[in-house]
Image (cartoon, helix red, strand yellow):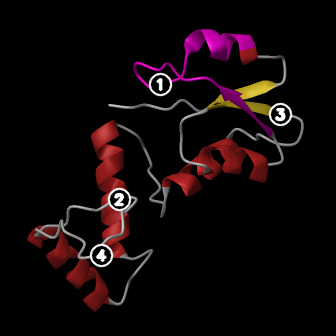
Amino acid sequence: MVGSSGRGDLLPFHVPEIGEEEIAEISEAIRSGWLTTGPKVKEFERGVAAYVGANHAVALNSATAALHLALEAIRVGEGDEVIVPTMTFAATAEVVHYRRAKPVLADCRRETMNMDPADVARKMTPRTRAIIPAYDE
């Protein structure tokens, strides 16, 4: 398993756990000539759709892209407000701003680091179109 980054004194943002099975799958995909939208991605999308009982699933390259697509799907735009947690990756608010909507920060509970429902309720207005919750295990 590749778990040690060998990055010296750097404190990595995230160190992935990559085993031999993942390395074999990546090698197969690279050898196929498809790095993004090929048969492996289609197989993955079908598997995810079946697993969650959906008709379709779309694979994206990041959670940022997924948030962007979700906001686009519900047509969040200029003049809208989207409530986001204070403790989250910057992209959570950035995708709201990208859609020309206003990110509204809701406090998180100290003991869980999850959004405080009472603060979310206080921040809601008639212009609130969505809430992007954070979840911490």
The amino acid on which the numbered mark 2 sits, given as a three-letter code, is His
Q: Given the current orientation, which residue lies at the most extreme right position?
A: 79
Residue where numbered disc 1 is placed: 114
Query: What segment is highlighted magenta in the picture?
Result: 102-122
For this rendering, which residue is in front, 121 or 78?
121
Q: x%, y% of residue 103?
A: 74, 37
| Figure label count | 4
Q: Which mark is residue 14?
A: 2
Figure quadrant of residue 119: top right
The amino acid on which the numbered mark 3 sits, given as a three-letter code, is Asp
Q: x%, y% of residue 29?
A: 28, 81
Of callouts 4 and 1, the N-terminal one: 4
Alpha carbon distance from label 4 to label 3: 43 Å
Q: In this view, does 33 lie to the left or right of 93?
A: left
Residue where numbered disc 4 is placed: 7
At mark 4, the secondary structure is loop
Vertical order, 72 against 121 (above or below): below
Alpha carbon distance from label 1 to label 3: 23 Å
